[in-house]
Image (cartoon, rainbow, N blue to C red):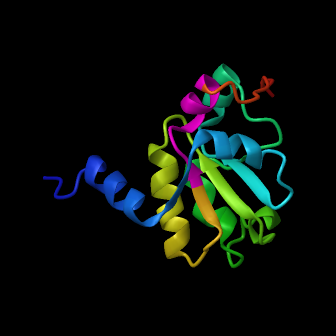
Amino acid sequence: MVKKGIKKLIADANEVIETLPTTEAIEAVNDDNSVIVDLRDIRELYREGRIPGSTHAPRGMLEFWVDPDSPYHKEIFASGKRLVLHCASGWRSALAAKTLQEMGLDNVCHIDGGFKAWKEADGPTEAVEKR
């Protein structure tokens, strides 16, 4: 039996993380001190596109890519730049932002409503070609 469901996990995360309104997130695209991090599965990117200039970090690998002691570490996550996370609707990114805070990062936030809200606000997107 699940003792703490996904709704509660997301609500708990949203109490302790920074959530950017979509309008502010759109401005972050041109901010040299921010990195937009797309947590969606690669098939979602192929199907729906992505935010131009964003870094793709599949949700299942995020902690490994962030941790400098991991053999999978990616330097972009040690850049000191603000990490602006997003997924499709803001659920995975809320949980991921909380996890990164628990790992010690204080320069992390997520986009309210995710990529869906981004598109509804006419944020820029680009196609992703299958490899």
Q: Is residue 50 above or below residue 54?
A: above
- The x, y position of residue 101, in whole percent, is 53, 71
**Number of numbered markers:** 0
Query: What's the residue at 81%, 24% (across, down)?
Result: 129
Horizontal side, residue 10 vs residue 67: left or right: left
Occupied quadrant, residue 108: bottom right
Query: What's the residue at 49%, 36% (across, down)?
Result: 89
For the residue pair 42 and 22, the one nearer the viewer reads as 22
For the residue pair 102 and 31, the one nearer the viewer reads as 31
**Residue stretch in magenta:** 110-120
- The x, y position of residue 107, in whole percent, is 65, 69
Q: Residue furthest left?
A: 1
Q: Residue furthest front?
A: 23
Horizontal side, residue 117 vs residue 13: left or right: right
For the residue pair 129 and 51, the one nearer the viewer reads as 51
Give the quarter of the figure containing the C terminus. Answer: top right
Q: Is residue 101 above or below residue 58?
A: below
Q: Main secondary structure of the magenta part?
A: helix
Query: What's the residue at 67%, 67% (across, down)?
Result: 66
Q: Is residue 114 magenta?
A: yes
Horizontal side, residue 130 vs residue 41: left or right: right
- The x, y position of residue 3, in whole percent, is 16, 58
Q: Is residue 46 magenta?
A: no
Query: What's the residue at 77%, 57% (across, down)?
Result: 34
- The x, y position of residue 49, in whole percent, is 71, 26
